[in-house]
């Protein structure tokens, strides 16, 4: 198996240091020759019985280990990395913008703990189940703005979704503005399927764009809108802060189902009514079954540093040379 298979080097210039190795070896040979010296003898018979040092053939261990350690250090300095690669593929996905109402009435507690928090948690679960989709978030009340543009980074989206709360913007219910802002986020999308999930618990009370006008804009841009009316039938408990603490009042549920149904009809979507947590979750499950359009995706493999094994090899070789020089070969010519 090739040690450098699939490896490339970030700092190839360090390989020029390999030219030092011949100099190291040359210096070692020259030093050995200088230390050997010479001795004139009339006869060698007196040395014939001298016992040879059993380590004699290994006396060059020092230069070998140092050269190998030097090579390992150079490789480490050159920063070997797993090769950066990519491949084009296709995956099933669509572009989705979730437009959610954060008006004061969303604090009613017919859904638990309230409409806003229930809607947030179920939407987050929906997002996590669609990892291949680009999803964005628009919030609206008396006005609207984009909390998160279309993104595949769902961790960021989920964090931003978790931060939304009532009171971030002026109170009211600008359904038309919320839908228009959501549709605007999709105008640059080249996905074959573009969807808005519009969630509200009331009727349009403010804003410069009527809901059905926003629906016509969505239709022209081929954006399919799924509308969700949130709230039980009749009355819902609403918390009111009083000098005696939080008191609950029964307030009427005033969802403009006619407008929400028309928005869905105009854009080719569907209208759903969520009267409790379970039905809201089921609605998101139904939307999850939407036909998916093929979106081109480029998959990237991140570079990984591979210098550490070579640095460790160099350290081990130098440590071995040090230990041998100060134990077994202590005093030997190296």
Image: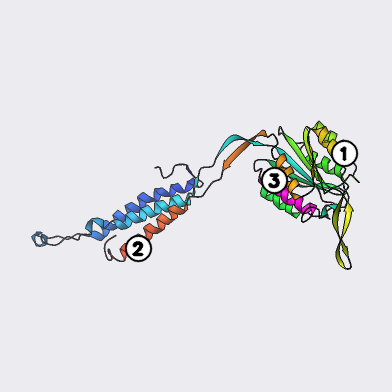
> Which residue does the numbered mark 3 point to in the structure image?
126
- Tag 2 secondary structure: helix
Disc number placed over residue 61 in the picture, else none: none
- The residue to which callout 2 is attached is 322
Query: In this rendering, would 310 be left or right of 140?
Result: left
Segment colored magenta: 114-131
Label 2: how many Cα within 10 Å (few below 14, some 14–19, many 20+): some
Dot in front, 1 or 3: 1
Q: CA distance from mark 2 to mark 3?
A: 61 Å
CB of mark 2 within 8 Å of CB of mark 3?
A: no
Res 154 visible: yes
Residue 125 x %, y %: 69, 48
Q: Nearer the viewer, mark 1 or mark 2?
A: 1
The residue sitting at 37% across, 57% down in the picture is 317
Image coordinates of residue 10 in percent, x first then y, are 51, 46
- Label 3 SS: helix
Residue 258 got which mark? 1
Q: Locate residue 46 relative to residue 233 in the image: left or right.
A: left
Q: Please report the residue visible at 67 percent of the width from the left and 40 percent of the height from the top.
A: 133
- The CA span between labels 1 and 2 is 87 Å
Whether residue 121 appears in magenta in the rendering, the answer is yes
Magenta stretch holds residue 153:
no
| Depth check, front residue: 21 or 156 | 156
- The secondary structure that most of the magenta stretch takes on is helix
């Amino acid at each position: 198996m090739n040690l450098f298979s699939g490896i490339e080097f970030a700092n190839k210039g360090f390989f020029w240091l390999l030219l030092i190795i011949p100099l190291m070896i040359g210096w070692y040979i020259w030093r050995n020759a200088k230390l050997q010296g010479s001795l004139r003898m009339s006869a060698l018979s007196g040395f014939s019985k001298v016992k040879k040092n059993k380590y004699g053939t290994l006396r060059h261990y020092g230069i070998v280990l140092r050269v190998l350690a030097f090579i390992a250090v150079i490789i480490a300095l050159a920063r070997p990395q797993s090769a950066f690669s990519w491949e084009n593929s296709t995956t099933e996905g669509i572009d989705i913008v979730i437009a959610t109402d954060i008006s004061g009435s969303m604090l009613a507690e017919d859904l638990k703990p309230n409409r806003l928090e229930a809607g947030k948690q179920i939407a987050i679960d929906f997002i996590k189940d669609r990892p291949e989709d680009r999803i964005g978030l628009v919030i609206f009340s008396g006005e609207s703005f984009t909390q998160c543009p279309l993104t595949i980074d769902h961790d960021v989206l989920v964090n931003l979704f978790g931060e939304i709360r009532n009171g971030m913007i002026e109170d009211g219910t600008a359904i038309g503005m919320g839908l228009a802002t959501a549709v605007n986020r999709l105008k640059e999308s080249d996905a074959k399927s573009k969807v808005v999930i519009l969630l509200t618990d009331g009727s349009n009370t403010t804003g410069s764009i009527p809901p059905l006008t926003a629906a016509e804009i969505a239709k022209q841009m081929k954006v399919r809108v799924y509308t969700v009316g949130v709230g039980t039938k009749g009355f819902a408990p609403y918390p009111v802060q009083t000098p005696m603490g939080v008191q609950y009042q029964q307030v009427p549920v005033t969802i403009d189902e006619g407008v929400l149904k028309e928005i869905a009809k105009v854009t080719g979507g569907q209208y759903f009514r969520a009267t409790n947590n379970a039905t809201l979750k089921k609605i998101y499950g139904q939307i999850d079954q939407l036909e998916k359009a093929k979106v081109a995706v480029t998959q990237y493999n991140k570079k990984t540093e591979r210098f550490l094994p070579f640095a460790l090899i160099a350290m081990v070789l130098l440590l071995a040379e040090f230990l041998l020089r100060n134990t077994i070969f202590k005093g030997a010519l190296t």
